[in-house]
Image (cartoon, coloured by chain):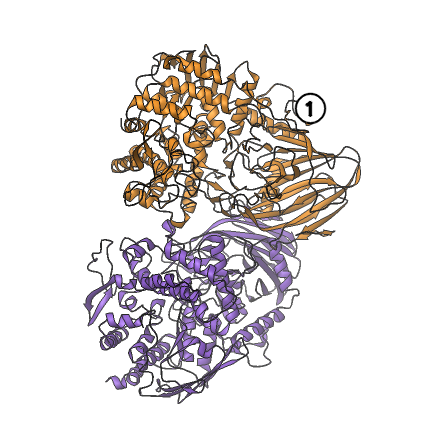
Chain colours: A orange, B purple
Amino acid sequence: MEKYFCFIAFAYFSFFGLNAQIHLNSGIQSKHNLNISSNGRNNSDQSLTDYVDPFIGVENGGNVFPGATLPFGMVKLGPDMCAIDPQNMCYQTNSGYSPLDEKVLGFSHTHVSGTGGGSKYGNVLVMPFTGKLLLDDYSSLRFNEVASPGYFSLVLNRYQIKAELTATQRAGMHRYTFPKSDQSGIFIDAGFFLYSGQQWGENQELVGSEIKVISNTEIQGYNRVRGGWNMGGAYTVYFYARFDQPAEKFATWKGTELKENSNLEVDSGEKTGAVFYYKTSNQQIIQLKVGISFVSIEKAKQNLDQEISDWNFDRVHAEAVKVWNKELSKIEVETPNEDQKKIFYTALYHSMLMPVDRTGENPSWNSSAPYYDDFYAIWDTFRSLNPLLTLIDQKREVDIVNSMIDIYKHEGYMPDARSGNDNGRTQGGSNCDIVITDAFVKGLKGIDYETAYQAMIKNAEISPGGDERKEGRGGIEDYNQLGFVSSKFERAGSRTVEYANCDWAIAQLAKGLGKPADYLKYKKRASNWTGLWRDISFEGATGFIMPRNSDGSWVDNFSPLAVGSWKDFFYESSSWEYSLYVPQDVKSLIDKCGGEAKFISRLDTFFTKNYYNMSNEPGFFAPCLYSYSGRPDKTQEIVRRTLAKNYNSGRAGIPGNDDSGAMSSWYIFHTMGFFPNAGQDVYIFTAPSFKKATLHLESGKQLVITTQSLSEKNNCIQSVKLNGKIWHQSWFRHGDIKDGGSIEFIMGNKPNDWGKSNAPPSMSD
Amino acid sequence: MEKYFCFIAFAYFSFFGLNAQIHLNSGIQSKHNLNISSNGRNNSDQSLTDYVDPFIGVENGGNVFPGATLPFGMVKLGPDMCAIDPQNMCYQTNSGYSPLDEKVLGFSHTHVSGTGGGSKYGNVLVMPFTGKLLLDDYSSLRFNEVASPGYFSLVLNRYQIKAELTATQRAGMHRYTFPKSDQSGIFIDAGFFLYSGQQWGENQELVGSEIKVISNTEIQGYNRVRGGWNMGGAYTVYFYARFDQPAEKFATWKGTELKENSNLEVDSGEKTGAVFYYKTSNQQIIQLKVGISFVSIEKAKQNLDQEISDWNFDRVHAEAVKVWNKELSKIEVETPNEDQKKIFYTALYHSMLMPVDRTGENPSWNSSAPYYDDFYAIWDTFRSLNPLLTLIDQKREVDIVNSMIDIYKHEGYMPDARSGNDNGRTQGGSNCDIVITDAFVKGLKGIDYETAYQAMIKNAEISPGGDERKEGRGGIEDYNQLGFVSSKFERAGSRTVEYANCDWAIAQLAKGLGKPADYLKYKKRASNWTGLWRDISFEGATGFIMPRNSDGSWVDNFSPLAVGSWKDFFYESSSWEYSLYVPQDVKSLIDKCGGEAKFISRLDTFFTKNYYNMSNEPGFFAPCLYSYSGRPDKTQEIVRRTLAKNYNSGRAGIPGNDDSGAMSSWYIFHTMGFFPNAGQDVYIFTAPSFKKATLHLESGKQLVITTQSLSEKNNCIQSVKLNGKIWHQSWFRHGDIKDGGSIEFIMGNKPNDWGKSNAPPSMSD
């Protein structure tokens, strides 16, 4: 049976996204290729942005941001809708956008993409309207939604106003096409922010807001908010807005009181806003552009004037398309399947939304280092998103790493998560450790690794105390004393196994920096996962990570299928999955599981019974484990199966939260045919999906990946040539490709002996 | 011998401040009673402010703020001088003011009073000048310094400009009298902040600044700074300045580049400023007024316009005097000794500078609770300053307590210290616990004690981890497990004994809130000081708090005289002093010391050999210990001796840092004749210094304290009547005086049996 496994299994799944389902709601169309001229898009030649559909992943909880933004852009200008919770109350999703028939509340300038939990941002909301403005009832259904890189538009049913949005790094531009009306208007709500309703208990709270009408074409102010998913302190989004035509009259409000001809609402902790009134002819366009800043109103104005000096919406949009095309062209794929290309470039686009480059916009300290925010969370991104950037955008990865180190220098800890200029929340381990070591082992220059090492040692040695959800390693005192995090701490299971992997990252860096004693110390700790390894059996598998008391006794009756959250033993995963999470030492894991045969059988059970949860990150590396036990064909089969099952070009085309592009970057690696073991300079061959993929490296050199005999059925690698050399093993090192080169796959529908010997490296080798 | 102890000892010390030394530097005069009319002071009747000399305590490291401010005022407008450090570099003291011949750099709007360590604040500096402005060389020597409540002035030698300052809560007013010059000017430095030089490693750092010339009479901007003594995060002081006459021309600068006719410097992390140029005739007055805010520029403008609507400097000054007189009149003292009155009312004035009322000015969260900042530190103030406010300004103490609870609710911990909107540093214990219980046992209403209790339990149970200098109780894991903080933690000695006192505060509140199990738990922990009690002898005293390892072994060769700091076993004190710090259970302390006789002998050694350090707070209660062992006469003698030795009406008239008024409040209590055991509803009679003192309580009732046979020699209480009743014991409860009443002392020069029996209460009673 096994011989044909990879062929047979595939009967159940489609390939190349052919089973993609496009969910179209009444009045809402995902048609980025339509109406190009009317959207002001540059249609002179086919560009990679044409393959990006920002609506992929807006359903199924993907929570991707579909609005207008640049790569890693500070401004993410998009619509915020009124979703209705079970208590019939209005709330906003994490991206602001709701995929169904929810009403539009306006268009705000800051968002995150693909996140879960309590919402963050949604600052500085703009809304056009006609008729009398009712502050408690102005929202509108919409139709004709269009989204593409750097562009978003929809039509507001209630007002028959077409809204179009585009963006630069730090400014947004709005183009509203009005019907004829004596009562047209556009307001800016300085008090608005995304509100998650009662469901999370992680809501943002207003600290204050202020608004000032400077002239009949200018409004400035700010929105100051705290809380949200990462439970962060107050952050302030300052704004400066210019309108392209003078308002007939204006008003401001505080709380719910609208005051005609008032031009100022000073911050008293309440919501404030201002409205400009116009008389519009039919199809009259009114434009405004809004600069934002986390530093000051004047900085927001400067950002605006530096980035958008004219009123040419189409030019701004075309610039955004140009920037995106440049970024997307870092990987060129060849395939006759346009749908597959759409999935790929949308995934690549989604891999370039976060973290956010806010260099020069840090209100917390002054530094020459770059400043990135919205690490949301590194627990999600360290496994494949950061390694992807290292491969295709090294300079940015260096900047990101340097910003993490700078955060440590000024705030005491590198982030595991960070948003709104404040660290928090720590999900699993201090996975920034792995990002650092990943950069080091892959030879990234321009990083102060000694300081980074100090930051890692702090993670490993100093308890964050009561702030254990904010940063550092909660329960580290147990881990360092007992060899495991005991059940008195939350997330003791996931923490223990992740800390062990983080400690291997520390050990590797210690070795690289010439600290042999530290190397041995942390190498030893990197085995601490065994402290929770209990020799009990479920469904033929023996040995599971299980909860343990600080006296060494085991907590009984814990189900290996129990999936937890913040307060539980495992975070967003189960023991079936986390018991396989020993990426630093798969060899020892195989031994613990009873040898290769039992390990393979255990993996078969794991994948066959769907104990593997693709929609959260702890299982990201699991398909590669087969390659450590002589069955790379099964890695290939599972990867192809998982890609086909979980990714498509529809609005639900991402397996749950995109997690800042984590899911998307998983897709990118695997369709290119390899996947990183983060924190090591090792990639595992998986199964390519393209006839040809060309990575344009920063050095100017190329890594060209070609695949012969590529087909849906042929998901077994028959042979590989790396840089022209026959390559028998199922893995390679970063050094083998960092200066470009070639990978040549030949595929077939039955596994042969390729890659079965010479397993990828493990700590205990 | 002992019989005459209190008489003989006094031969060495003067009384009533008669030994006061007034340090007058060439050109600097402390003459607040001179030139009253020329200073614009309302001289219509003698007022209590006339007894306040803000220069008392500017020398001898007192670091009091001598500038213009209101009680607990947000604006503290005063001069900043260029003091010269050993490396010949310019630095600023904690108050900005330097007492000798240092040059004036300008007048900034925010300061603290009486603090040590790295400087904080000094934001928004204004400076007048004549001639060409040289940004790197503009400072000036000064003469004719005058300071009184709400007023400060000096003359700048170099420019022959008289500078006068007054203040409201959130705005400052400047009156500059110029000589004739075609090149007069006034600049605002938005980049300035107090810089401590290399001495502390706790320097403030610039985050950014911005300045904008709005018109030829208006300048606005902000200064954003982080760091300083409490190592806090960034805070921003926004400002809005109006000048009373239009500038001839203006310029701005960024870094060191002065740009004529430029009106804007946008924040790029550099220092910025703006200058207004004038042509002045001889004696021409130019005034400006500056509103500040921690929220926004518009709020700063609103603060200014609400508080100073005209250009009448003298009116603003007179209002300040009125407010101060009202505050100072809460205690009326009668004495023929004008110097003593001066010391007393200056001490009362100094007790009303900090913390700072910033209600409505909190940029970190939105709340209906009051907001106080600059708890600097509660470790200093909980012993006598907070109890003094409870006695004479209960509403304010309730507000202060509520702001502490609100800080806990929004940031996770009550402060031990806080400044610039950020908690930090924790010096000894979590002494906020004691402030809460002090309020509770004294019956303060309008406080959510249940939430406060949760905050206290968090202090007692949850380790602050790596943030142990920021908040909470560092080493609490040791303390709760071992019964003491082991030597692996810094400040293990002071922490252990202070935590024990704090735990008694928790126990008392637990009892009051009906939590008997908690009461017993924390009462038990309140004996944890015994965990470090080592039965070794020095100079006849047996038993000292000594460092101990976590395995229970003792650290040898530790001197009982070693005075430490942050990283040491004791903070700002020695074992001689901290071994006597068991205010919650003096009875057990006496037992541990070998009984009353040995205890008295130990105290004698302690005071005679000057192991008692009045200039730091751990010994604040020490003189009262005699009253627990049948020798209240010695309490009285030591108190009078300490008063006479340490306090006078000179510029060095405070024993070191005033510590936010801690030293001053110690003086107030003792000269009234009693001293609180903070966290208990108990006061110990000490030795009155006034014939009559009347406390005007908020209830409208009065507590009248009279003393017969008062003299320098008569420092032994012969008898006391409390509310008309003969009072044999040396202590009373807050309930005995809270609704007013009377205390009648009769003094003599030899102790009798008064107060010897019925010792004050101890936990172990």
Q: Quadrant of the N terminus of chain A?
A: top left
**Above or below, comparing residue B692 to residue B36 in the picture:** below
Residue placed most toward the observer, B613 or B145: B613
**Residue designated by label 1:** A35
Q: Is residue B54 visible?
A: no
Q: Is residue B272 visible?
A: yes
* Label 1: which secondary element: loop
**Above or below, comparing residue B172 to residue B732 in the picture:** above
Residue lying at 62% horizontally and 45% vertically, measured from the top left: A192
**x and y, in percent, of residue A232 in the image:** 49, 46
Residue B724 position by quadrant: bottom left
**Above or below, comparing residue A576 to residue A279 in the picture:** above
Label 1: few (<14), some (14–19) or many (≥20) C-alpha neighbours in 10 Å: few
Q: How many marks?
A: 1
Residue lying at 54% horizontally and 37% vertically, measured from the top left: A112
**x and y, in percent, of residue A684 in the image:** 38, 22
| Amino acid at the residue labelled 1 | Asn
**x and y, in percent, of residue B503 in the image:** 36, 63
**x and y, in percent, of residue A36 in the image:** 67, 23
Residue A242 position by quadrant: top right
**Above or below, comparing residue B71 to residue A373 in the picture:** below
